[in-house]
Image: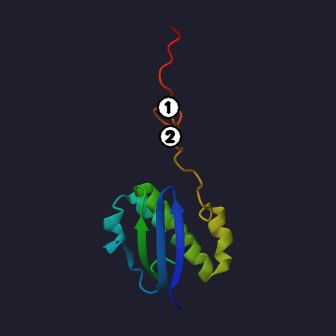
Amino acid sequence: MEVINTLGRRKKAVARVYMKEGTGEFVINKRQSTDYFPTLVMQYKLNQPFEITETAKKYDLQVNVDGGGQTGQTEAVRLAITRALITINPEWKSDLKAAGLTTRDPRMVERKKPGQPKARKKFQFSKR
C-alpha cells in the first residue's frame, strides 16, 4: 500500500494527513498526538474514525496541521483521517457517514462590518 494523502478543514484550520500501513504511529507536526492534543476529548475525536472502522493501530499517520485553534485543528484532522479511510475501503463510508464524520462543517466566523464594533453588535443608540 502506498501513502494516502488527504486534506481536512474546519474554520481556519487545515490538516494534511499522510497515511500508510504500519503499527499505529501517530505524529502531528513532528510531535506525538498525545503531546500535541493532551485532553482526552480531543484524543477521542482523533480515534473516532478508527474505532468505527475497527482499524486501530493498523496505520501510521504523519499529520501537518496549521491555523485555527485546538478544537478546529482536532476536527480538521478527524475529517482528513475519515477521508483517508474511505479511500482505503469505500465500504466504510456508510458507517462513517452515519456517525457524522464525512461532513465538512461549514460554520465560519462572521466578518466584522464597518460602523459596528463587532460582527453583530451595534454602538449604543442615543435618541437625544
* Circle 1: residue type: Gln
Tag 2 secondary structure: loop
Whole-percent x, y for residue 70 in the image: 40, 57
Query: Do the residues bearing badges 2 and 1 touch, measured as CB atoms within 8 Å?
Result: yes
Whole-percent x, y for residue 18 in the image: 47, 80
Residue topped by disc 1: 116
* Circle 2: residue type: Lys
Give left or right: position of 92 versus 127. right
Number of residues whose C-alpha sits closer than 10 Å to that of mark 2, classed few (under 14), some (14–19) or many (20 or more):
few
Residue placed farthest to the bottom in the image?
Answer: 1
Residue displayed at 49% across by 31% down: 116
Give left or right: position of 25 versus 76. left
Instruction: Measure the C-alpha gap from mark 2 to mark 1.
Output: 7 Å
- 85 w.r.t. 116: above or below: below
The colour scheme used to paint the residues is: rainbow
Residue topped by disc 2: 112
Residue displayed at 42% across by 80% down: 24
Whole-percent x, y for residue 60 in the image: 43, 82
Nearest the eye: 98 or 64:
64
Nearest the eye: 1 or 107:
107
Tell me if residue 48 can be seen. no
Tell me if residue 25 can be seen. yes
Number of residues whose C-alpha sits closer than 10 Å to that of mark 1, classed few (under 14), some (14–19) or many (20 or more):
few
Give left or right: position of 103 versus 42. right
Residue displayed at 68% across by 70% down: 94
Q: How many marks?
A: 2
